[in-house]
Image (spheres, rainbow, N blue to C red):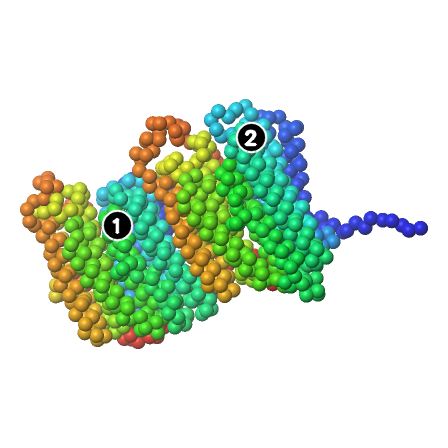
Amino acid sequence: MSANSLTSILIWLPVAGAILVWLLPLSRYATGSLALLFSLAEVGFWIEQAGRFDFSRSGLQFSEHAKWFGELGVSYHVGVYGFSLWLVGLTVVVMAACVGYGFWVGRDRPRGYFALMLLLTGATVGVFEAQDLVLFYAFFEAMLVPLYVLIGVWGGARRMEATVKFVIYTMAGSLLMLAAIVAYGLQAGTFDLVDGPASTSRWLFLGFMLAFVIKAPLFPFHGWLPDAYREAPPEVTAVLSGVISKAGLYGMLRIAIVKFPEPTSFYRTAVLALAAAALVYGSLLAFRSTDFRGVVAYSSLAQSGLIALGLFAGTDLGFDGGVLQMIAHGLISASLFLIAGVVERRTTTGEFRLLGGMARGRPALATLLMTVGIISLAVPGSASFAGEFLILAGVFQRHWWWAAIGAGGIVLAAMYMLRLISAVLHEARGSTVADEALDVRPGELALVVPLVAALLALSAWPAGISHHSFLGKTPTAAVRSQFK
Amino acid sequence: MIAYSLHTPHVDWFGLGPIFVLIGASFVALLCAVLVPQAVRRVTAATVSGLGFTAGLALAVWLYVDSAHGHTIVSGTFYRDRWTALAQVILCAVGLATTLLAVEHMPGWSRNADRSRRDDHIAEFYALLLASAAGMAFFVGSANLMVMFLSLEWFSIALYVMCAIDYDLEAALEAGLKYLIIGSFGAATLLFGSALVYGATGTISFQGIARAVAAQGLTGDWFLVLGLALVVAGLGFKMSAAPFHMWTPDVYEGAPTTVTAWMSSATKVAALLLAFRLMTTAFAHDTHLWTWGFAIVATISLAIGNLAALVQTNVKRILAYSSISHAGFLLIGLSAGSALGGRALMYYLVPYTAMAFGSFAVVAARERELGVPVTLDNLAGFGWERPFLGVAMWFFLFGFAGLPLGGGFVGKFYVLSAAYRHGWVWLLIVGVLATLVSLYYYLGVVRAMYMRPSEELRVRTETGVAVSGGAPARERLLHLAVGAALAVSVGSLFAVQPLIDLARHAASALPL
């Protein structure tokens, strides 16, 4: 086994696991264990890959190339860059925690459920590793299929509307991206992302961007977000906001910005305006939300805006900060949604007016929520402080007012996050909070604590990501050279 | 003294092999109806049909290998080339799957059907299946307008009878009659168009027409244009492309589901592949006319098929409209009129036939279980009750919608690429928008299978409407057929290059 096949293993191991889990007529317990085993193996393979990754060298690593259909210049081409390595890591870690959560709460119809979760893992890793546009599109769409069923079958009461909205929104974007891919690839003669030339077509840029701003999402393309985030099972929401939304932001970085430099600078102000609007509007909505998941959902919208602000600033600091914040926010929102699930399991609700006073007698829950909450509101010294500071500094170089808007958004983050913490943990005891409701169980701790530990590690050493994403060159130089 | 002698052409028996094997098997199956005792008639006839299709498949593969240099045989009336052979391979494979599906088919699935009469027409059914397959195998290779019309009638008449073979069912009789009348109208249109083309060019041979047009400068001649338009319309009826689709939903819904599965997949293969050959060979000098014509037909099919499917509740009708919309997608490849378009068409037909056949086979399973027509309501919970069939249907529906769970994705990608390369960005956009609309009803079926709350099911059970009770029948052969369709539709996603190579060799027989 050559080291390069690690990339393919990371994609296809969970897919194989999905087929196996679905086929084997095992008990509920054995099915969950097997799925968890596959997700942990996935984490292991990623650690192996990260260990072998050469951080002193620019360009694609662990690449594999095989013909798919050569006539049109479409190939199976996968590989990782510094930043995609981190995003794959985020994916496998968050997915492992979420598979574990599904196991812990004992989801119905376990074979279908775990097969779909593993399928989703494979597809998402594929998005971050694909170096061919058609392959990228295939994985991008393949994420949607398990998500649709996961929300539609295991979701809440209004799941039907949520799934329809979610699928139609995202497909509207990605089908136009398909049109753009066909046009780009046939003009260029290849669909390869590494070899493909830069394009100056503004239409194609818009085709790609529409798919990414819906997936991320940015204002005003977030119509699907509140319903999907509220109705999905908590661990699926954790995946959606922690990982899937990053696929949209990754697409902006890997394809829109890199392959369309001229349209990027042409539309820069427009995209920055949308991103700033998402940041401010999302923060305000989060502040106005009356339930746990609503706050975290809208804060995800705000954070997507912030990250897009960094990426489209087009400066070294902006790129570094954008990538760092993608990872940090992925971990934060996944932990927060899992904690929301923990709270909902004890109280049957996430409504603030029915919650409150949960800190009393539940030190573990209080500590967890406080830790993640404090990190997420960008207290100096935290990972998201580093990320947000870099983004603001980066966008400041573009123009000071973007940084001013961004800083305003971060102040709002403190407001909604503190409101969330106090509404759940403090204040008077809510009507649904029973004295018998247990503290976080060891099983749940085992799922959330690793995510929080990763966040704390990042807080201690944010340069681990921000200085190890664009290798060998400054980020802007790397982008300009199309990561070659 | 003048010696009169009838000049008989040289006949390449091997080149016509698949057709003779199929028609021979059809005769044997028909004899089974008379000679074989009723107790073993079903098994015997099915075996004959299976052997016939297997032999036809083997011969077609052999012909594909052996016909690298295409030429016409039987004094220029039939093409022996790879385009024909590959089409026959697909047809025989679908026929084989239909044979499996039909073994467990009980005519008259309404509950009061007479059990003792259930094997009455099984041998005739297989005879007609084989006969229609033989007709299609002849149709795809036809090299002049007369052979084209004769073979079209040949397989159409077999299909008319197959639609109505469950004469206990009013819907089946209605479907048969409707198909007969509208199908005859379509055939007449084709015939009239052929006559006009003959009138304009003085020849019925495909290549002769092209030569005459070039030699006499007939491009844009009114007779020829009108004839071409009528030929396009006549073939449009068989492809169930809008606006020639009116019969499709009713016939697909009313006909026994086994027959629908066969019709929806095989007829499209035959009609589309012949249309591509006819257009590129005979009307090579009028490309600008028929490419536009088919592009418009494709657009109308995509619009009507997808929009009408949104409001359907009967699953067979949904799939029928989906079949109309797919005629549109496939026609995008045809309308590009290029070698790339031909390859795209040939490739797309492989996963499409698998998905179309497979989805109707799954519907057939539910129908046999319930004894009533399958609607979105009584499909509730099917995915959990029959996990394999549910997952297969899941793959077929997402594949139809162009999500990358099968070759349907690559097929769509290819036809859209062909349209773009032709310079038709608008058609690319139309195809993309149509896909978006189609998602809604495909996902509706998935929703019905997996996401309906169990309360609804319980209500249904109490009123005794839907669930017949007890374990569903274990239809091994149906599962085998669905499994094969699933394997082809998923496999074609991974084996794109080999399939495209086959299609390229096939398309190299055409004058492109």
As shown in the figure, which amino acid type bears the numbered disc 1?
Asp
Quadrant location of the C terminus of chain A in the rendered image: bottom left
Q: Dot 2: within a 10 Å radius of its alpha carbon, few (fewer than 14), some, or many (20 or more) residues?
A: some
Residue B262, percent across and down?
54, 42
| Residue B280 visible in the snapshot | yes
Element carrying mark 2 = loop
Element carrying mark 1 = helix
Quadrant location of the N terminus of chain A in the rendered image: bottom left
Give the quadrant of residue A257: bottom left
Residue drawn 64% across the image and 63% down it: B219
Q: Name the residue that disc number 1 marks.
A: A227
As shown in the figure, which amino acid type bears the numbered disc 2?
Tyr
Task: Kindly give the residue lying farthest to the front in the view shown.
Answer: B222
Residue drawn 11% across the image and 54% down it: A419
Q: Nearer the viewer, residue A410 or B306?
A: B306
Q: Dot 1: within a 10 Å radius of its alpha carbon, few (fewer than 14), some, or many (20 or more) residues?
A: some
Could you say which disc has been placed on residue B167 in the image?
2
| Residue A47 visible in the snapshot | no
Give the quadrant of residue A171: bottom left
Do tag 1 and tag 2 residues touch (Cβ < 8 Å)?
no
Could you say which disc has been placed on residue B201 in the image?
none
